[in-house]
């Protein structure tokens, strides 16, 4: 009876996951159809009456943008919540639909950017960029081993993958903001890409903060009261150390591009997290941590 109820719960989770993905795909398809219709109309006008292109009205309908924001937030939420599904039970099936979530997030993110070209909205810009980060997480989750490990041994792997995804996303948005910076002239920005430069920098900072928080959680994982594993295998130590070093390189690159003191502070926290990571697993604290974790 208990197993039957667990099956119903996980099938409900998967159904909700796929329902949000289906809504995102529908919005992306509708945006693609709208974009293609507008492109055809502009192409006909360019051949018959080029001056009419300058007089073409811009749609101010906010319903599409609001729908994309709501569905986008829901899709980001279900992707991150599905990352905590315990492998080794039927909940592991949630990870089988990770590619669907990644493709849905990429499609809806593209749809959001295509909408921004016609009607600018700060909320839609933030959500569209967040969808690309969620897609990176969903892609990374697909490569997490799906064995029969307990939850406290599986979650550090998921956190490390999410940390790497957030680090790469942060570096990408800061780099893209530097590329789009070229479209800002002395009189201000004259393209949508130029108006998105502050959004890319903000998103780069937010994702970097998330990566640092995830790194601190990975570093302190064995000393948490509800964890019963030392998490000190050579593979785990190497992967977590590599994730910290990648984040540190990204923060250095971000500081050189943005010249923000916040990136220096995040870099200091990353170094401290790396020290704690190595000390807890292989330093003088290891002899204290392992017995305490084993008795939890």
Image (cartoon, grey):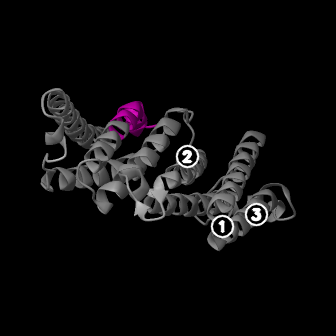
Residue 70's place in the image compared with 29, above or below, is: below
Q: CA distance from mark 2 to mark 3?
A: 19 Å
Most prominent secondary structure in the magenta stretch? helix
Q: Is residue 269 magenta?
A: no
Instruction: Choose the circle earlier in sequence order: 3 or 1.
Output: 1
Residue 11's place in the image compared with 119, above or below, is: above
> What range is drawn magenta here?
88-105
Query: Could you tell me if the residues under marks 2 and 3 are in contact, i.e. CB atoms within 8 Å?
Result: no
Residue 165 badge: 2
Query: Around disc 3, counting alpha carbons within 10 Å, would you say few (fewer than 14), some (14 to 19), or many (20 or more)?
Result: some
Camera-side mark, 1 or 2:
1
Which of the pair 89/173 is nearer the observer? 173
Camera-side mark, 3 or 1:
1
Residue at which label 1 appears: 259
Left or right of residue 218, residue 80 in this image: left
Quarter location, residue 248: bottom right
**Residue lying at 75% horizontally and 67% vertically, measured from the top left:** 272
Residue at which label 3 appears: 271
Which of the pair 112/281 is nearer the observer? 112
Q: Is residue 34 in view?
A: yes
């Amino acid at each position: 009876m208990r197993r039957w109820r667990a099956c119903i719960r996980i099938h409900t989770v998967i159904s909700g996951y796929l329902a949000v993905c289906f809504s995102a795909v529908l919005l992306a398809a509708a945006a693609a159809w709208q974009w293609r219709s507008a492109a055809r109309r502009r192409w006909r006008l360019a051949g018959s009456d080029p001056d009419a292109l300058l007089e073409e009205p811009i749609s101010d309908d906010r319903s599409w943008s609001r729908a994309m924001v709501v569905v986008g937030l829901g899709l980001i939420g279900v992707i991150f919540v599905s990352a905590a599904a315990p492998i080794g039970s039927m909940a592991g099936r949630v990870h089988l639909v990770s590619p669907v979530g990644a493709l849905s997030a990429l499609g809806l993110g593209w749809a959001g950017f295509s909408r921004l070209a016609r009607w600018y909205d700060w909320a839609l810009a933030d959500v569209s960029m967040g969808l690309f980060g969620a897609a990176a997480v969903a892609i990374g989750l697909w490569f997490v081993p799906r064995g029969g490990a307990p939850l406290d041994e599986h979650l550090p792997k998921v956190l490390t993958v999410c940390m790497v995804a957030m680090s790469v996303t942060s570096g990408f948005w800061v780099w893209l903001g530097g590329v789009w910076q070229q479209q800002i002239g002395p009189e201000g920005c004259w393209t949508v890409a130029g108006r998105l430069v502050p959004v890319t920098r903000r998103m780069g900072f937010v994702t970097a903060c998330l990566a640092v928080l995830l790194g601190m959680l990975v570093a302190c994982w064995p000393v948490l009261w509800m964890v019963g594993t030392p998490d000190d295998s050579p593979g785990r130590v190497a992967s977590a150390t590599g994730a910290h070093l990648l984040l540190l390189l990204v923060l250095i690159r971000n500081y050189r591009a943005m010249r923000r003191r916040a990136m220096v502070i995040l870099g200091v926290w990353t170094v401290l997290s790396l020290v704690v990571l190595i000390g807890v697993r292989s330093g003088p604290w290891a002899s204290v941590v392992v017995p305490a974790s084993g008795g939890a």
